[in-house]
Image (cartoon, rainbow, N blue to C red):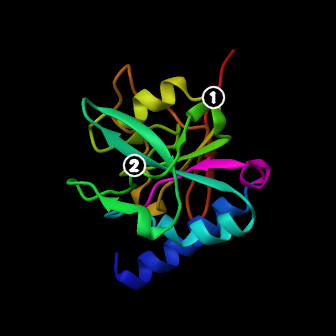
Amino acid sequence: MSQSERFESDGVLLRRFMELPQVAESETLLLFWGMGAEPDTHSIFQPLLKEGKVIGLPRCLPGGGMEFRRYEGEEHITLHPYGMREPDLSCPLILPRAADLALIPAMCYDETCLRLGRGGGFYDRFLAGFSGHTVGLCRERLLQKRCPAQPHDRQVELVLTEDRSFRQNVTG
């Protein structure tokens, strides 16, 4: 995608995310700072903060763990060796059970709300114990019919593209 196509796609995806009733109803949101082909989520931080929302961003831990820390401005952001922007240790910890909604990054999603991540399993481990709303953003051109899955892979509740949305098919 050209830079202008990505910018346009980001705008539509993030507008659709911000219009979700789950976002309006949430007090604490666990987000990520987009990198690579991921949407540039940083553009929604300030609008959410102005609405009084608390934003948590992930921080990778040794041994494959992950925690979320409160976003307190760019001056408290460090660059992880793998290129992710993450809050520094001065930012307060946010326990996942205190969050209402998590925006989950992925290289792509499929129509069943499964994601293809970067292979570290950080978010699959997180999703296994998270009880809030989960949303994924996927550029329409990256949407797959079916992502390869392993038993530990977890779906998100809702996937938004520029044109469509997909809900997890919950049985039971």
Q: Residue at x 77, y 55 (%)?
A: 24
* Magenta highlight range: 21-34
Is 19 inside the magenta-drawn segment?
Answer: no
Task: State the residue at coordinates (39%, 50%).
Answer: 108
Q: Do residues under tags 1 and 2 come within 8 Å of each other at their CB atoms?
A: no
Give the residue type that dot 2 points to.
Leu
Image height of 52 relative to 136, above or below: below
Query: What quarter of the picture does the N terminus occupy?
Result: bottom left
| Mark 2, other Cα within 10 Å: few <14 / some 14–19 / many ≥20 | few
Tell me if 140 is positioned left or right of 82 in this view: right
Residue 14, x across and y down, in percent: 59, 66
Kindly give the residue lying farthest to the top in the view shown.
Answer: 172
Regarding mark 1 in the picture, which secondary structure is present there?
A: loop
Whether residue 28 is in magenta: the answer is: yes
Q: Is residue 125 toward the left or the right of residue 11 in the image?
A: left
Say what amino acid the circle numbered 1 marks: Ser
| Residue with the mark numbered 1 | 131
Label annotation for residue 89: 2
